[in-house]
């Protein structure tokens, strides 16, 4: 019995498994469960969008209403944080929000894989966005972009210290953006696995424990609902912070 507990780990669900090994010029291009579910998230989001198109009728379908709601939520994020200048960046923001949402939701399906539970994915995504935002800032303001690290009216003696603090606080945005998504998804899925394993152990033990397994089972159902909400919320927060960081470089806040 002890061996079973050792073999079944709540962290096993985050293991990256190579499905189709492929090496070209010394570089690893293997298809893993992570890349597979990333592609599934992409194609599922595109398929969902195709379901929401009007089809030979002026009456919107349920899929259309759902897409319009998602569109309005994303448009609200862009309008509230970027204003009219956010229209140019809306396609990217919408695609980012939709992709992260489906990555999180597909990860809730039993025996699937949560792409956003790996810091490698979330950090790479956050770093790519961060680099792109800085390129936009430099293209928009030129050399004045670096005034972002030095507010006006600062006494000269503390300028070096303040620039260092501002620069570090600016760089840390990459880590906060990536770690927030990674930590929330990893901790939530780990908790679900632990509660599910606990309920199964009580059921397998038989007797009175088999009756009381309904308690952790009910808790598991409630946590699944909570985790679905967190999956949607984290996609929203990541998109919101992306808009806020983009607005900072456009307006030099």
Image (cartoon, helix red, strand yellow):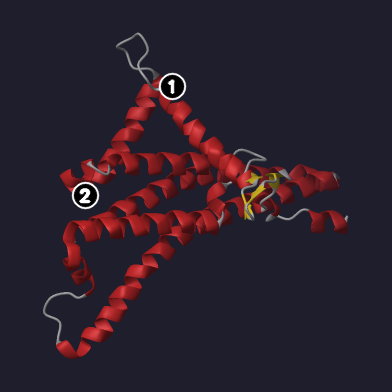
Residue at 36% in and 59% down? 130
Q: Using residue 9 as the reference point, say whether residue 1 is left or right of it.
A: right
Position of residue 128 measured from the top left corner of the image (x, y, whole percent): 41, 55
Q: Nearer the viewer, residue 182 or 158?
A: 158
The residue that mark 2 highlights is: 82
* Closest to the observer, 252 or 19: 19
| Side (left or right) of 136 relative to 3 | left
Q: Mark 2 to mark 1: distance in Å? A: 29 Å
- Counting from the top left corner in percent of width and height, residue 115 is at 56, 48
- Image point (85%, 45%), residue name: 207
Residue at 48% x, 61% y is: 179
Whether residue 181 appears in this view of the structure is no
Residue furthest to the bottom in view is: 157
> Is disc 2 surrounded by few (<14), some (14 to 19) or many (20+) residues within 10 Å?
many
- Which residue occupies the extreme front position in the image? 25
Q: Work out whether 160 lies above or below 40.
A: below
39 on left or right of 247:
right
| Residue 51: mark | 1
């Amino acid at each position: 019995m002890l061996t079973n507990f050792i073999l079944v780990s709540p962290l096993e669900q985050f293991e990256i498994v190579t499905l189709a090994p492929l090496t070209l010029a010394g570089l690893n291009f293997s298809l893993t469960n992570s890349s597979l579910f990333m592609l599934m998230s992409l194609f599922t989001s595109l398929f969902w969008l195709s379901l929401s198109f009007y089809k030979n009728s002026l009456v919107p379908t349920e899929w259309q209403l759902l897409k319009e709601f998602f569109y309005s939520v994303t448009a609200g994020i862009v309008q509230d944080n970027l204003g009219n200048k956010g229209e140019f960046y809306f396609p990217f923001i919408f695609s980012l929000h939709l992709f992260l949402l489906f990555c999180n939701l597909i990860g809730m399906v039993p025996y699937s894989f949560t792409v956003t539970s790996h810091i490698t994915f979330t950090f790479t995504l956050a770093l790519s966005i961060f680099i792109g935002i800085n390129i936009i800032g430099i293209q928009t303001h030129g050399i004045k972009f670096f005034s972002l690290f030095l507010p006006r009216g600062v006494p000269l003696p503390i300028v070096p210290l303040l620039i260092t603090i501002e620069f570090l606080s600016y760089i840390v945005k990459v880590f906060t953006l990536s770690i927030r998504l990674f930590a929330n998804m990893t901790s939530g899925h780990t908790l679900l696995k632990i509660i599910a394993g606990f309920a199964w152990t009580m059921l397998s033990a038989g007797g009175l424990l088999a009756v009381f397994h309904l308690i952790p089972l009910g808790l598991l159902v409630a946590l699944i609902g909570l985790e679905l909400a967190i999956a949607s919320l984290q996609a929203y927060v990541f998109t919101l912070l992306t808009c806020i960081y983009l607005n900072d470089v456009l307006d030099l806040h």
